[in-house]
Image (spheres, rainbow, N blue to C red):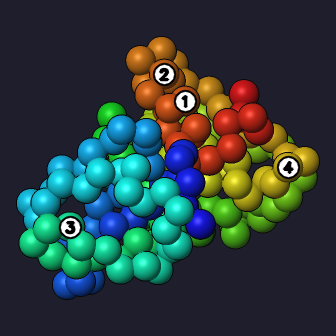
Amino acid sequence: MIEYGDNVLILLEDEETKYFSEVKKGGILKTHFGNLIMDSLVGKEFGERINLGLRDAYLIKPSMIDGVFSLKRSTQIVYPKDMAFILLTLDIKPGDVVYEAGTGTGVMTSVFSRQVGESGKVISYEKRSDFLEKAKKNVRRLGFIERVT
Ligand SMILES: C[S@@+](CC[C@H](N)C(=O)[O-])C[C@H]1O[C@@H](n2cnc3c(N)ncnc32)[C@H](O)[C@@H]1O
């Protein structure tokens, strides 16, 4: 059941147009097909069909990649194919401690934070404080900030 704080992917019936949004109290998602009052999603199930005004849409539980592509990026990011290559080549698994040079947008940091599991840790370095602040927000949204230093 969808609750406040959940992220949701609103996928239009054409299965191409999609909007990623957090379900916030009083939030409104403005789309070309109508405005969606986010409160109205609370209590609905993922997979349900809703009406946006001009189009129907489905409520989809977003994957991490959906979140990655929804971010406003301040730096170049690592793309999904490379993410998988990095995780496999470095053999990153639950319990590992990962050191990352260059947090950037925090996308790869988020992926590492999920992969290392509850007992692992990610230590990430970023020289620009403005990037770091944005990256922290992104990791809170996509990953597990409590596992990241
Ligand atoms: C391409 S971005 C990293 C993108 C990141 N992997 C992601 O997926 O979002 C490279 C980052 O490295 C940072 N950087 C470059 N040299 C650095 C250094 N010596 N110490 C710390 N951060 C550094 C840059 O400021 C930039 O944010």
Mark 3 / mark 1, whichever is N-terminal: 3
| Of pointers 2 and 4, the one earlier in the residue sequence | 4
Indicate the position of residue 126 as horizontal and vertical percent values: 55, 24
Q: What amino acid is found at the position of numbered circle 1 in the picture? A: Lys
**CB of residue at label 1: within 8 Å of ligand 1?**
no
Label drawn at residue 118: 4
Q: Residues within 10 Å of mark 1 (few under 14, many from 20)?
A: many
Q: Are the residues at dot 4 and dot 3 in contact (C-beta closer than 8 Å)?
A: no
Say which element carries label 4.
loop
Q: What residue is shown with label 3? A: 52
Residue 21 appears in the figure: no
Q: Which amino acid does label 2 sit on?
A: Glu
Camera-nearest label, 4 or 3: 3
Residue under numbered circle 2: 133
Q: Mark 1 points at which residue?
A: 136
Residue 102 figure quarter: top right
**Which amino acid lies under the numbered mark 4 shown in the image of this protein?**
Glu
Residue 55 in the image, given as x and y percentages of width and height: 15, 76
Q: Residue at x 50, y 73 (%)?
A: 46
Label 3 and label 2: CA atoms lie apart by: 34 Å
Q: In this view, does 98 lie to the left or right of 130?
A: right
**Picture residue at 39% right of the left edge, 65% below the top:** 9
Q: Which of 7 and 134 is in front in this view?
A: 7
